[in-house]
Amino acid sequence: MYQNYIRKKEIAYLLFRKLWLIMRLTTIIILVTFMQVSATTFAQKVTLEYSNMSLKKIFRELKSQTGYNFLYTERQMVNAKPVDIKVRDRQLSDVLDQIFKDQPLSYQLDNKTVVIYDKPKASITSVPMEFTITPNQVPVKGRVTNERGEPLANVSVRVKGNESIGTTTNSDGLFTLTNLSPKATLVFSSVGYDALSGELSSLGTDGSGQLNVIMKNSNSQLEEVIVIGYGTTTRQRVVGAVDQYSAKTFENRPVGNVTQALQGASPSLTIQQKSMDPNDNSMNINIRGISTINSNAPLVVIDGIITEGGTLNKINPDDIETVSVLKDAGSTAIYGSRSANGVILVTTKRGRQNQRPAVTVGTQWGVQEPKILFSPVAGYENATLRNLALTNSGMDPQFSPKAIADLYAHQDIERWNLPEIMKNSFQQKYNISVAGGGDKSSYLFSGGFYNQPSNFVGQDFGIKRYNLRSNLSTEIGRFKLTSILAYTRNNNMSNTAGSAIINASRLPPYYYYRMQADNGKYLVNNALTDQNPLAELNEGGYIKNDNDYFNINLNLEAKLFEGLKLRGIFGADIYADHRSIRRIQVPLYSSPDATQPQVYVNSDRNTEDFNEKASLLNFQLLLDYDRNFGSHHVSGLFGASNESYTRRQNELKMKFTDPVLGTPTTGTVIDP
């Protein structure tokens, strides 16, 4: 029987073909635009003529001429020197090199943003050296203060290379160390301050020989860019509880999907894997525990587009740039009631402007070994306990003293059946990406392959995943167009033995209990009267899944005037799933010498075929305002979004099919 489920009037197949045509046309347009714009790499021209001008005003002028944003702190501008410059029609990079030549600052280009940072200093204090410690001058005393001269308590002071020597400062910022070599290097660290280190003989002291160490506030964490709902902000300005994890969280981890990669990353994120089967990705994900009596799964947003929860595991972990976890009502409110269980925001990798082509190749191999954390009692002990349980229930014992003695005598040849259905599996992963960009454009192309065989014996069970992704961005005047296209193909095959571990583990380790005889026959006994996990794994059939996933994300941004941007976003998730189930009848015998089967595994000989096509479309129109007025910051967001979901599926179930071919026969029954 066919069952159809249609949530809208549109026909999913026609929609699928139209969206596929849109995706191909979009790719061609973006590639042509990218090739035209990339020819202007580093062609940005700048004209400046100033004398004794503050660095902040120079940045404002450069922004007005080039459109580049400058990220800096007020402390950096206070320490900056006035600038004298006279250039005409010079490249931006040359002008920046000239501006920062004699400054205590330096810069780094990141897309359309110039990030300002302090140049590293050789000394850890601003006090000149007035005293040199000799080997006879022990103990060593010192005082740690901040830039305002206030003492810092609980600062860690240790000797580099010798972790056994160290201390912390007291409430007055004082510390004492003994038996130090004049060439020893001290390391100072404290939360909220930049870590400092320096050789003991080069540290500045006061007239009494006491070391003076000045630590500077660390602004790097406050200036960290955080991805939030419908935009970004800095750690300093973020409202609500937000955790963010970079690509380093996922690097070099032997995992197959994003959910596994997030396990253990956050104390607020609880992830429970339900099965050891690599095909079973139905994990429980909770943010700050269980919050509702219904579904507790968080909302998943990928590159600004709301998706289904299962989509998270269709992404290659190596394609992820950052993952933000929104944990409280303040940070998730913008998504409405769907965010009651929290929000997971995923941002995929992209190219950088003004970056030469960079090719990254990654490979990973490993062996996955199943660990069985429990073991059964010996056979004779099991028989003794069974007799005790039966007599306590007023029944006759099952094993005679002679039978128990026989089990005791054959302990050395006992074999537990659970390890018999398990095996090691060889996991492999390959990734390659190409990224770069010009003055007005950026690109990233990546591909990956992942293979994870199952830890169950039997057929070629496991998962194979293929990933392709492109991320293109180009700017034309006040407009910026971003195109993200992704494709994922999953080929999975799993077994039909849903209770294999339970059945194999409850089988006592009696030396005469075997799941398969030497002549190849599969056996039953009084513990497993109608089941045999080994038979079902080896010959009981399979469940095959072939899934295709397409993702389209188009983003057009227009700068209306300073601080105000208009964004139009179109996102589409397209799914095409096919599942085929074949349960094959396997005879089970009471003994190796039996000629007739006692029972059959999968006696119904079920055959199932399932097809599904679905699409999730998302349209957004956002007006974003973000601007600084002196020391004040004003931001706001106004927008509207529309989502539509269409699904069409059919399924055919048959019983008593041909034992060999699985095709219908005269006795086949079609399930209603």
Image: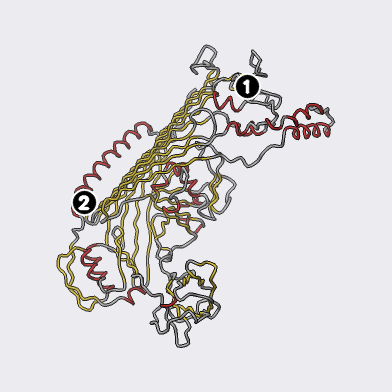
Label 1, label 2: how far apart the Cα atoms are: 69 Å
Point out residue 295 in the picture as x, y percentages from the top left corner: 55, 45
Disc 1 residue crowd, few under 14, some 14–19, many 20+, Cα 10 Å: some
- Image coordinates of residue 551 in percent, x first then y, are 37, 41
Q: Which residue is mark 2?
A: 38
Q: Residue at x 68, y 30 (%)?
A: 413
* Depicted 401 relative to depicted 566: above or below: above
State the residue in front, 582 or 419: 419
Q: Residues within 10 Å of mark 2 (few under 14, many from 20)?
A: some
- Amino acid on which the number 2 mark rests in the picture: Ser
Image side of residue 262 versus residue 97, left or right: right
Q: Nearer the viewer, mark 1 or mark 2?
A: 1
Work out whether mark 1 precedes mark 2 in sequence or the reverse, and give the earlier one: 2
Three-letter code, disc 1: Ala
Give the image location of residue 414, x and y in percent: 68, 31
Does residue 391 sit above or below 127 in this rendering?
A: above
**Label 1 belongs to which residue?**
517
Q: Residue furthest top?
A: 666
347 left or right of 656 in image: left
